[in-house]
Image (cartoon, rainbow, N blue to C red):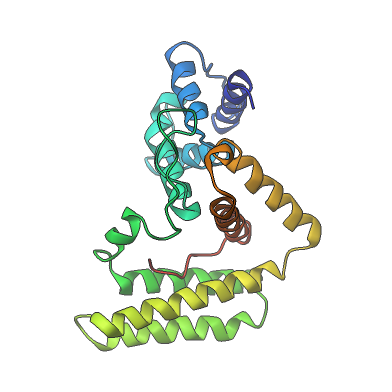
Amino acid sequence: MQIPEYCREIETYLCRKNDGHLIRVTGPSFDLVSGWAVRGVPLKIAFQGIDRYFERYYRKGPRRRPVKIDFCEADVLDAFDDWRRATGIGLESPAGQGSVEQSPVGQTSAGQAAGRRSLRAHLERVVMRLSSARAHGVLEADADDLIDRVAAELDKTRADARGLRREARRQAIERLGALDRELLAISRRTLDAATLAALEHDADSALAPFRPTMAGEAYARAKAAAIDRLVRERCRLPTIAFD
């Protein structure tokens, strides 16, 4: 996609989010959004970042003025970083200043930060979201056992006031990774062939700016992770894994 077209798509999406009020992506705003295109920010990821900003904006109460795209930049770049960590794409620009790193999926700074996050809080959020998905008919009946097993992991964590430590924590994290893969397999079964093909096409499109610099194996790994992320988003499912 050419940069002018990319900017028009962003402008159109921003217009919809602003209830039809048109805010032009021109001048410095055009330069800003052009930078996203040059860095390889997929349109759908940019849209997610814009959504994040609007969600916070709505929580502040009635809106007083239309949102400019400049206000959304931090959220767009955060969403892009999340996507790159999920797919294993490195942090360099695809357009040009050096090669793109390809880190193994899950072996990023996000994984290092996970050690400082609460495993218990993570499990509580996962159980809540899985229960909500089941209540709304998103998951098949055979997901009941999976939800019970995640809840059991939460109970194990709660059993120790200090939380799981060392080997017990490592084993718990490994089990969560296995449960996450099982959840994706269950959710894939709810999607027809046409939907899965469309998700594969979306993954290819999102990775297109990075593909020339990636080895075949790295690209296949990134594509698989991108499809998993799209399946998860479509089915509105949490990430059970705790990396």
Question: In terms of image quadrants, where is residue 162?
Answer: bottom left
Residue at the (62%, 56%) spot, across then down: 227
The N terminus is located in which quarter? top right
Total labels: the figure holds 0
Q: Residue 28 placed where, x, y %?
A: 42, 14
Left or right: 57, with 136 as reference point: left
Q: Depth check: 139 or 114 in front?
A: 114
Residue at the (57%, 53%) spot, across then down: 226
Q: Residue furthest front?
A: 215
Q: Is residue 65 visible?
A: no
Question: In terms of image quadrants, where is residue 17?
Answer: top right
Q: Depth check: 146 or 203 in front?
A: 203
Q: Residue 32 placed where, x, y %?
A: 44, 22
Please determine whether, in this image, residue 240 is positioned above or below residue 56. below
Q: Residue furthest left?
A: 162
Left or right: 154, with 112 as reference point: right
Residue at the (57%, 35%) spot, across then down: 209
Question: In terms of image quadrants, where is residue 183?
Answer: bottom right
The C terminus is located in which quarter? bottom left
Q: Residue 242 placed where, x, y %?
A: 39, 68
Q: Is residue 228 visible?
A: yes
Q: Residue 232 placed where, x, y %?
A: 58, 60
